[in-house]
Amino acid sequence: MSRPFQFKEFTIVQDHAAMKVGTDSVLLGAWVDHLNPKKILDIGCGTALLTLMMAQRFPDALISGIEIDPQAMIDARYNVKYSSWNDRIDLIEGSIFETPIPQLFDLIISNPPFFSIDTPSPIGNRALARSGSGSLLNEWIIEAKKKMLPSGRFAIILPLNQKSQLENIAKENKLFIHRLCLVKPNRRKDAHRFMVEMKLVSCDQLKNESITIEKEIRHEYTDEYIKLTRSFYLNMD
């Protein structure tokens, strides 16, 4: 059994899910910006980590999380049930490509299941989580766009080697990148992830950002990372 991950205002049990709590989801959930979303969708919600982060950050929002992996959904349902916000969260088991979701959303977030399309993990349902069962990033973006309100936004985190691909997909689908943040694991290494916010309307100027997670020593976090995530992590004050 995996040890539950305790955040300040909720706990993530992760006994069944292939993908455990990781920095990527916490980064995205803390970084995404919206003044007052009323309806939020978490695509590929896994253990419901991002779903619960959105519930904590936006007390007036109704949040939906969709997840194709039934094992991950076991953990997600447990985590939501025992959270303070279970009355505002709706979990949907199924594929984003096949499951009807009639409403549109102010904010859509995703830490996609195809962490590396070229090199999926060979280990059972972890491979499903990493490769998205063969789903292409282009199809993922199209589905997100279909579920956005005209004034909505879509936030996603990806490996840096998919940046050009994402930019081309956004252009082809008339989505406009408003914010882009490069993520460095530490001060000695180059960026390895990037986060973007996309909208259906163009912007005057792209907002370029960057963040470094650790200093030179492992688990010695930078001030900027502490500031961004202190509402969620324990011992970040």
Image (cartoon, helix red, strand yellow):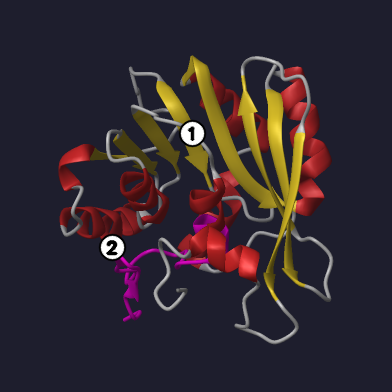
Is 149 above or below relative to 236?
Answer: above
Q: Which residue is mark 1?
A: 34
Locate the N terminus and report the quarter of the image it occupies: bottom left
- Return the x and y of residue 111 as percentages of the image width and height: 54, 49
- Return the x and y of residue 132 as percentages of the image width and height: 56, 47
Can you tell which mark lies on residue 170? none
Mark sitting earlier along the chain (2/1): 2
Q: Quadrant of residue 27?
A: bottom right
* Left or right: 177 in relation to 91: right
Is 12 above or below relative to 34?
Answer: below
Is residue 117 shown in magenta? no
Kindly report the secondary structure that dominates the magenta region of the rendered protein: loop
Is 113 above or below relative to 26?
Answer: above
* Left or right: 82 in relation to 207: left
Nearest the eye: 128 or 216: 216
Element at badge 1?
A: loop
Q: Is residue 122 visible?
A: no
Badge 2 vs badge 1, beta-carbon distance below 8 Å: no
Residue drawn where x is 70% and y is 87% of the image: 217
Residue drawn where x is 58% and y is 57% of the image: 130
- Return the x and y of residue 53 as percentages of the image width and height: 38, 52
In whole angstroms, how far apart are the C-alphas of marks 2 and 1?
Answer: 20 Å
Q: Amino acid at mark 1?
A: His
Residue drawn where x is 69% and y is 29% of the image: 178
Q: Amino acid at mark 2?
A: Glu
Q: Quadrant of residue 177?
A: top right
Element at badge 2?
A: loop
Nearest the eye: 138 or 110: 110
- Return the x and y of residue 195 as percentages of the image width and height: 66, 46
Which segment is the magenta one? 1-26
Can you tell which mark lies on residue 9? 2
Q: Residues within 10 Å of mark 1 (few under 14, many from 20)?
A: few
